[in-house]
Amino acid sequence: MIVIDDAQVDEQDIKTNFFVRPDDTGKPRASCVVENLRELNPEVRGSAIVASPAAAIHASGEQGAAAAALDSASLVICCNQPDSLVCDLSRKCSELGKPLIVATGAGFMSRIRTSVAEHAVIESHVDEKSDLRLMCPFTSLRNHVDSIDLNTLDPTDIAHVPYVVLIVKALQKFAAGDGDSDGWANYPERLTRNERKELCNVIRRLAVVKPDEENFGEATKNVMPQCMPYEIPNEIKQILNDPAAATVADFSTAATECKSNLTQQINRRFWLLANALRRYVASDYAGGKLPLSGAIPDMKADTKGYIALQKVYKSKADQDKSEFVKHLTHVLQEAHLQADYFTQEEIDVFCKNTSKLRLRRTSTVHDEYASGPENLSMLEMNGVLNHYVLFRASAEFFAKHARYPGAPALNSIDKKESLAASDLNLLVESDTTELSDIANELLAKWKGDNASESTSIPVNMVTEFARSGFSELHNIASVSGGVVAQEAIKLITHQYVPGNNTFIFDGILGRLFTAKV
């Protein structure tokens, strides 16, 4: 952790910054913050660079250490900086391939923006239904189902048959109809909604004695989600169809070039695995399906029956993994990499999560600031359009006056409390009028032909922004800092899916809004 800041701790910091103490007044803020942050967790290593944030972008003289820190960083977090500096930092991070988080606070409001050129996630931990392949059962699953004869089981044993077996048995009977076949020849690949309802009745008829047993209830409940045609998730299709998954570059030298950039290293490894997955899916063996994860959900069953079913899925998953490794070996050869480039653990994790892969590419902050938001309708739909416009309008106000709305000029009065109440009220009133004009102009500009005479920002919201003077409140900063920390962990660890790409917290409503801009 490296903190870059050239400010000295002042009275306002003592009142609003939790990580400085009264006796830190006059000391470098970066050093004080790092010292107190390290007390929270002794295992964290941190250092301070007393230099302007701009020095991290434009190295010069003794401030070259700030630029070196940026070059070696895994993630850059920028807090409460002018848009001009944020845009320069965004360009620098794009050039270096570094993820960037920009956080801005204004009284009861805060805005967080994540920017990353490319972010691949294997362990996304997204919630989705288990991949049980009930509509396209593999050979070993069919054999396992055939080995269980419900007619020979007593009521106690039937009550402990896993619902997976019950659904497949019911599908066999449904396919066989009144005939004497075992149902495999006409096993359905898809069912209509009415046919799925009829399948539930077939399941109940399998229970000769007690159709209300828990496992039969699980079976009927899982008919709707599980008895759907097999299809690769759209997010995975997009990854497999991406040009990066279709070609294999010579990574033997590229890996060395990006050695200092963790994000690029992970992304390069991801695309090698994705390329092998693309070939696997296209193979005759896979038949357009992903490798089976081998995981099955909890269900009503006795230990023996559950373990037996678990072994069936685990065996199939291992078989699919072995086939995947064959394709991966060819990909590594084409990339001029060693056969052991990936550890067995990496391959295991990838194959287990092939249906949960995610890829995040966000727009850059400097492009957004130059042209305006791409998805104005999403901001409006999510209820944060006015918040967003006011943050942007406040930035334009700062560019014009070198101060934020409602805040005195730094070069004349550096303590808001030193203004007389009447003068402060006049300042807020005057700035509210100008901020409202800027905000409404921006809104009309971005809406274009969709703008109307009623297109304007509510006066009470404009007043709140101007009244805040862009000061930071402990409780709002705490919530916003938690969101920043959460997104930072996602971006660094490549686990869970980072937001795309804007968070706005309204402390008055106590709500966090997200939108893609």
Image: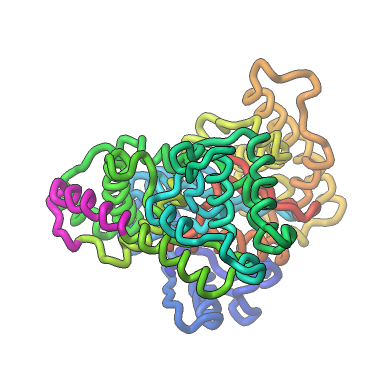
Above/below status of 156 relative to 449: below
Predominant secondary structure, magenta span: helix
User: Does any portion of residue 333 appear in the rendered image?
Assistant: yes
Quarter of the view holding residue 492: bottom left
Q: Nearer the viewer, residue 186 or 392?
A: 186
On the rendered structure, is 388 left or right of 95?
right
User: Does any portion of residue 27 appear in the rendered image?
Assistant: no
Q: Which residues are magenta?
A: 319-340
Quadrant (top left, top right, bottom left, bottom right) of the N terminus: bottom left
How many numbered discs sit on the rendered protein? 0
Quarter of the view holding residue 107: bottom right
On the rendered structure, is 55 left or right of 424?
left
Quadrant (top left, top right, bottom left, bottom right) of the C terminus: top right
- Residue at 33% from the left image edge and 59% from the top image edge: 262
- Is 21 within the magenta? no
Quarter of the view holding residue 444: top right
Residue reaching furthest top?
Answer: 449
- Residue at 56% from the left image edge and 80% from the top image edge: 40
Q: Nearer the viewer, residue 478 or 278?
A: 278
Percent position (x, y) of residue 149? 52, 60
On the rendered structure, is 491 left or right of 428?
left
- Residue at 27% from the left image edge and 66% from the top image edge: 344
- Residue at 55% from the left image edge and 62% from the top image edge: 297
Percent position (x, y) of residue 76? 44, 57
Residue reaching furthest right?
Answer: 422
